Image (cartoon, helix red, strand yellow):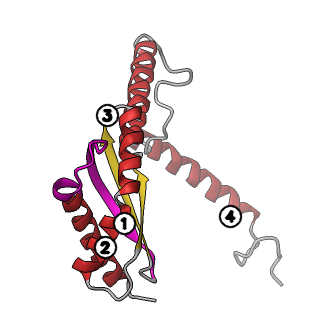
Amino acid sequence: MVDAARARKLADRIQQIVAEMLERRIKDPRLGFVTVTDTRITNDLRDATVYYTVYGSDGERAETAAALESAKGVIRSEVGRKTGVRHTPSITFVMDSLMENAAHIDDLLAKARAKDAEVARAAQGAAPAGEANPYREPPSAEDLDEDEDEDEDLDDLGAAEDGEDGRSGRPSS
């Protein structure tokens, strides 16, 4: 096991090497407009997964995947030569679905905006179902005066029920 910082540094270095190789050294005509988006490596530094995107149609994506598979050996040997690790990690190319996910999120946001606009149109002439202000408000000064009068009346009633010594319910001896 290797510490996570070293694994991350190696993954970043592999990403740079692969991107550079695809840009300068790999001259496969099937290779489309490829962008290396991320690289992840296992904790034992044996397997590296390179995520990529391709700008183009589904056919171009399939051709690019085939071109990357055929160039995998050359890319792996270059990674081993430039990183200097004892065991060169095996490389797996995975199509990153970042573009499709972004398009899906954009569609969902557009639907949410349309629903919000629909709700806003429906709420324009609407009135609340209950009271105009359903929240409790702090009592006003008039309410406080009325409460004090009620408390005084209750105190008078309580004194009459208490015994002579002020204890309720027990006669004094």
Q: Marks 4 and 3: CB-CB under 8 Å?
A: no
Q: Amino acid at mark 1?
A: Gly
**Residue 78 spot, x, y in % from top left:** 26, 72
Q: Amino acid at mark 2?
A: Ser
User: SS at mark 4?
Assistant: helix
The region drawn magenta spans: 22-43
For discs 1 and 4, the disc positioned in front in the rendered view: 1
Q: Marks 4 and 2: CB-CB under 8 Å?
A: no
Which disc, if any, is residue 56?
Answer: 3
Q: Which mark sits nearer the N-terminus, 4 or 2?
A: 2
Which disc, if any, is residue 73?
Answer: 1
From the viewer's perspective, is 42 left or right of 150? left
**Residue 13 spot, x, y in % from top left:** 24, 73
Name the residue located 69 percent from the left edge and 61 percent from the top edge: 158
| Label 2 neighbour load within 10 Å: few <14, some 14-19, many 20+ | few
User: SS at mark 1?
Assistant: helix
User: SS at mark 2?
Assistant: helix
Disc 4/disc 2 C-alpha distance (Å): 99 Å
For discs 4 and 2, the disc positioned in front in the rendered view: 2
- The residue indicated by pointer 2 is 77
Q: Marks 1 and 2: CB-CB under 8 Å?
A: yes
100 to 89, vertically: above or below? above
| Label 4 neighbour load within 10 Å: few <14, some 14-19, many 20+ | few
Q: Amino acid at mark 3?
A: Gly
